[in-house]
Amino acid sequence: MTTVNPNHAEFKTQDAASYNPVAQSFDRFVTQLSAPVAARLVALAGLAPDNHVLDVGAGTGIVALRAVAEMGPSGRVVGIDLSDGMLEVARQNARGRGLADRVEFRKMDAESLDCKDGSFDAVVSLFALRHFPHPETALQEMHRVLRPGGRLVLAVGSGAPWLSLVGLVHRLKLLPHVVRRFQGKQLVACKFLDGMVAAYVPSSGKSEEAGWTHEHTHMQQSVPAFIRAAGFQNIRSEWQGQQSIINTPEEFWELQTTFSSLSRKRLATVSSEVVARVRQDFMNTCREVLSRGGELVYPTGALLVSGRRA
């Protein structure tokens, strides 16, 4: 039995709560920017019409709703998350699409799943693993609730792998972007706002991310290793990424204060006057770059890893 570290429990509670005020924005942006990754994740799961699926860290339901829509009427999905705000938006989305009778969203800790052994045919998870203080425990739980032969597919945010054709091609495509940054004609999320917020709001000493993410910077090696250690076999991985142009400084601000853990959490701790100063500085910089013919860019990269329970 895993001993619960009070600091880790507090981290999970506060991390989930930080998403409550931005759940609607998160839903809009994840649909706009992460739909290709969600579609590929569901495709890799190879779902049958009558499968029962668990979506870990479901957020506002982009993966759960896609999965249940692709299965037959007897297919079922349970999506879990710790954020009340995200779960409420997910339920609204399910009702709006007429899928509420086939997908259920529940508040649950990924590191202690309230599910029976072998109760799911597939477990999927999009960009959630980095939020777990103990990813090895979460993966062991996912393994436990899968039936023998069941499939795991998860995605984590990651840079392109160096030793691969897809990584080489991606980096060649980035060369023009590097030139534009050098010329002062490109701002990149979320590094741009994170740097600005860090200057205005020093760290309180509490990490905005799960500690292990700083110790395992090479996700291409660490995530498959975690999955293998949890008991999964036939492990495969692939990577996909894109560069999205954001049209306005206002949207660029909303996007980063939604997706960036550092900016979202630190700005929530300071006065509205400090937030206004940061925002004004941010807007001025964006407008200056745009006036020079520059652009505002949000890069996304996802390592997708799959495996099976023996």
Image: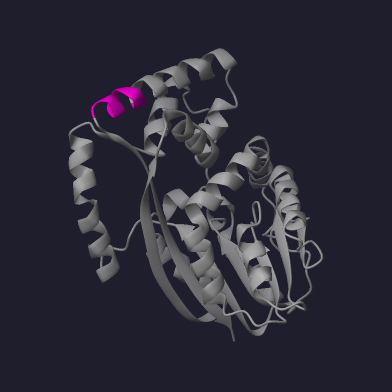
In the rendered view, does 283 fall on the left or right side of 136? left
Which residue is depicted at the point 73% across and 63% down? 113
Where residue 236 sits, quadrant-wise, is bottom left
Where residue 242 sits, quadrant-wise, is bottom left
Which residue is depicted at the point 51% across and 50% down? 32
Which residue is depicted at the point 66% across and 56% down? 61
Q: How is the image coloured?
A: one colour
Where residue 302 sits, quadrant-wise, is bottom left
Residue 251 in view: yes
Examine the rendered structure and indicate whether residue 85 appears above or below residue 291.
below
Give percent across and percent down for residue 245. 37, 43
In the rendered view, does 247 fall on the left or right side of 16? left
Which residue is depicted at the point 42% across and 29% down? 249
Give percent across and percent down for residue 191. 38, 37
User: Considering depth in this image, is 139 or 188 the residue closer to the camera?
Assistant: 188
Examine the rendered structure and indicate whether residue 17 appears above or below residue 131.
above
Examine the rendered structure and indicate whether residue 72 appears above or below residue 56.
below
Examine the rendered structure and indicate whether residue 279 appears above or below residue 13.
above
Give percent across and percent down for residue 171. 24, 57
Which quarter of the image is occupied by the N terminus? bottom right
Residue 230 in view: no
Residue 124 lies within the magenta run: no
Which residue range is magenta in the image?
A: 286-292
In the rendered view, does 59 fall on the left or right side of 286? right
Q: Farthest residue toward the top?
A: 273
* Count of picture labels: 0
Which quarter of the image is occupied by the C terminus? bottom right
Specify the principal SS of the magenta part: helix
